Image (cartoon, rainbow, N blue to C red):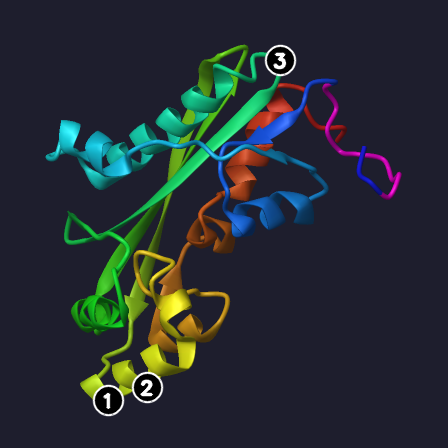
Amino acid sequence: MPEDGSPDLWRPVTALVLASGSITRRLLLESVGLSPVCDPADIDERSLEAVSPASAPPDLALRLAEAKASAIAQRRLDGVVIGADQVLALDGEVFHKPAGSDEAAAHLARLAGRTHHLHSAVAIAEGGRIVDRFVETARLTMRALDAEAIAAYVALAGPARVTSSVGAYQIEGLGIHLFSHIEGDHSTILGLPLLPLLSRMRQRGWLRF
C-alpha cells in the first residue's frame, strides 16, 4: 500500500520491483497507481552488446532488459521484477549516450532531418525466472537542424541533460522542439511501454482491475 494509506492497484502480496534507477520509469509506474521498489541492476551493457554485435537493435534491447530482470530476480525470488531497456537506432546503427556536449551535438547532427527508431524492451521475471518479454518501437523524425540551431539547443538543455540519453534529448522537455513527426506511444518513447506492460500484468491477475 502507498505511504499515504490509499489502496494500491497491485494485487499480489509480493513486491513489484523495478530493476532500474531510472526516475522516469519509476514515475511512469507511479502515475498509473503502482508503487515499485527500485533495485537497479548493475550490468555491463557494452559487454552484452559485444557478445553479438550483429544483433538487430530490437533483439539487443530485449537482451539488455532480460539481463537486468534476471540479475535482480536472483535476489528477489519472492517479487515480480521488471527489467527495461531502450535502444536508439538510425538505419540499424545503435547509438550510445554521448560523453559530452560536443558528442551530443554530433549525435544531433546525424539525426537531424532523418527518422530514427527507439526500441523499448521489457522483461518480466517471477520466481527467479523470465516469464514474459516484449519490445515496442517508436519512429521519430527530427527536423532539419543547422549547426546554429543544434548549438542553441545543446546550450539551453545543458550538459547534464544532453548526456543523459542516447539521442541527446528528452522528448518531455526542450527535446520536443527538435521533432517534426513522431509515431509511437509516449511511454514507449520514455522507455517503459505501459499499455502492453499493464495488459500482461492484468492477464496474470496482478492488477485489481
Residue at (62, 13) in percent of width and height: 78
Given the image, on which type of amino acid does mark 1 rest?
Glu
Residue 67 is situated, as x and y percent measured from the top left of the image, at 36, 26
Q: Is residue 5 magenta?
A: yes
Measured in 3D between alpha carbons, the distance from the residue under mark 1 to the one under mark 2, in whole angstroms, is 6 Å
Q: Residue 78 carries which label?
A: 3
Query: On screen, 99 above or below 38?
Result: below
Label 1 packing within 10 angstroms: few (<14), some (14-19), many (20+): few
Label 2 packing within 10 angstroms: few (<14), some (14-19), many (20+): few
| For the residues bearing labels 2 and 3, Cβ distance under 8 angstroms | no
The N terminus lies in which quarter of the figure?
top right
Please, what is the dominant secondary structure of the magenta stretch? Answer: loop
Residue at (82, 40) in percent of width and height: 3
SS at mark 3 in the image: loop
Q: Is 53 or 184 nearer to us in this picture? A: 53
Given the image, on which type of amino acid does mark 2 rest?
Ala
| For the residues bearing labels 1 and 2, Cβ distance under 8 angstroms | yes
Q: In this view, does 15 lie to the left or right of 161?
A: right
Asked which quadrant contains residue 133, the reply is top left
Asked which quadrant contains residue 201, the reply is top right
Residue 92 is situated, as x and y percent measured from the top left of the image, at 15, 48
Q: In this view, does 100 lie to the left or right of 34?
A: left
| For the residues bearing labels 1 and 3, Cβ distance under 8 angstroms | no
Q: Residue 152 carries which label?
A: 2
Q: Report which residue position mark 1 lands on.
A: 148
Residue at (55, 50) in percent of width and height: 23
In magenta, the rendered stretch is 4-12
Residue 170 is situated, as x and y percent measured from the top left of the image, at 43, 64
SS at mark 1 in the image: helix
Decide which of tag 2 and tag 3 comes sooner along the chain: 3
